[in-house]
Image (tube, rainbow, N blue to C red):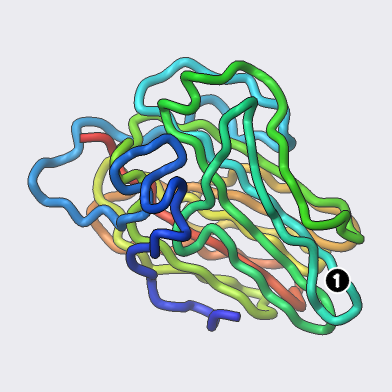
């Protein structure tokens, strides 16, 4: 497990990207952390419509779009290991796991809490129709998985992701970051909590909140402003486990 408040991560190895070093539809580098300085952003990343729970997708109109899918699982096989995400697809298009922080897991007390982030870029979105996202799991988890999805516009298609950070460990106050988010960028966060707790989001807008008697989930997003950015979650009580991912979506140039 990573340490609470772990420092932001850098670029991803090729195996964490789609198609051996490219994004899921062949963009030049789906995993670099976006430190380009040759030109300023031509637009701003924006949420298209609402961040939604579930897997039923209605594709919105937009340019330079990116679909983000979050998977939240609490599970255990008795030794602390849980179900794994093997694939995510929309129609005939496979999604790719977000580099570096696309899989964050916390194993404690013989249970595992997992959050994963998967994405599809504009080329892939344009090639599919409305339908249901298909998530392949290694086995049926003991607890009901939760899924969310959101579409964003204005995302850099060559280098969609910037700096990222993650957090694990039992906490009542979870702070993930800081990450540098340029003006026009959008930082997105996803969390799976090991208890049924209420969550107050600081420094960000709430996306989806859901859960059951076993665990709670949350997504959130915040605008960049050429400064370091952190997202803080204030919980109603201490969660035994939590897995939280934070990544910056770079604006199109």
Does residue 42 sit above or below 167 in this rendering?
A: above
Image-quadrant location for residue 107:
bottom right
Asked if residue 35 shows in the view, the reply is yes
Image coordinates for residue 129, horizontal then vertical, percent: 60, 16
Residue at screen point 50% across, 36% down? 120
Question: Quadrant of the image for the C terminus?
Answer: top left
Question: Quadrant of the image for the N terminus?
Answer: bottom right
Closest to the observer: 137 or 144?
137
Image-quadrant location for residue 8:
bottom left
Image coordinates for residue 53, horizontal then vertical, percent: 71, 37
Closest to the observer: 25 or 164?
25
Q: Is residue 91 left or right of residue 187?
A: right
Which residue bears the numbered disc 1?
A: 76
Q: In this view, does 99 lie to the left or right of 240?
A: left
Closest to the observer: 91 or 64?
91
Residue at screen point 79% across, 74% down? 81
Q: Is residue 152 left or right of residue 131?
A: left
Asked if residue 238 shows in the view, the reply is no
Image coordinates for residue 44, horizontal then vertical, percent: 30, 34
How many numbered marks are there? 1
Q: Is mark 1 on a helix, strand or loop?
A: loop
Answer few, some or many: residues within 10 Å of disc 1's Cα (few below 14, many 20 plus, some between 14 and 19): some
Does residue 187 sit above or below 88 in this rendering?
A: below
């Amino acid at each position: 497990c990573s340490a609470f408040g772990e420092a932001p991560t850098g670029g991803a190895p090729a195996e964490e990207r789609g198609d051996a070093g490219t994004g899921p539809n062949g963009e030049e580098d789906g995993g670099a952390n976006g430190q380009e300085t040759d030109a300023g952003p031509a637009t701003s990343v924006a949420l298209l419509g609402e961040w939604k729970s579930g897997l039923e997708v209605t594709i919105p109109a937009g340019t330079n779009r990116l679909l983000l899918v979050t998977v939240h699982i609490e599970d255990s096989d008795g030794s602390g290991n849980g179900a794994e995400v093997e694939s995510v697809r929309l129609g005939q298009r496979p999604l790719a796991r977000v580099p570096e922080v696309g899989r964050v897991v916390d194993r404690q007390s013989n249970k595992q809490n997992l959050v994963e982030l998967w994405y599809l870029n504009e080329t892939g979105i344009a090639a599919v129709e409305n339908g249901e996202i298909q998530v392949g799991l290694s086995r049926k988890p003991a607890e009901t998985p939760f899924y969310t999805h959101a579409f964003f516009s204005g995302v850099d298609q060559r280098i969609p992701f910037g700096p990222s950070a993650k957090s694990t460990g039992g906490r009542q106050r979870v702070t993930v970051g800081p990450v540098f988010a340029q003006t026009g960028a959008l930082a997105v966060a996803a969390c799976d909590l090991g208890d049924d707790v209420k969550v107050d989001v600081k420094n960000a807008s709430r996306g989806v909140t859901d859960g059951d008697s076993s665990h709670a989930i949350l997504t959130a997003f915040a605008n960049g402003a050429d400064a370091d950015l952190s997202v803080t979650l204030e919980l109603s009580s201490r969660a035994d486990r939590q897995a939280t991912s934070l990544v910056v979506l770079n604006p199109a140039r």
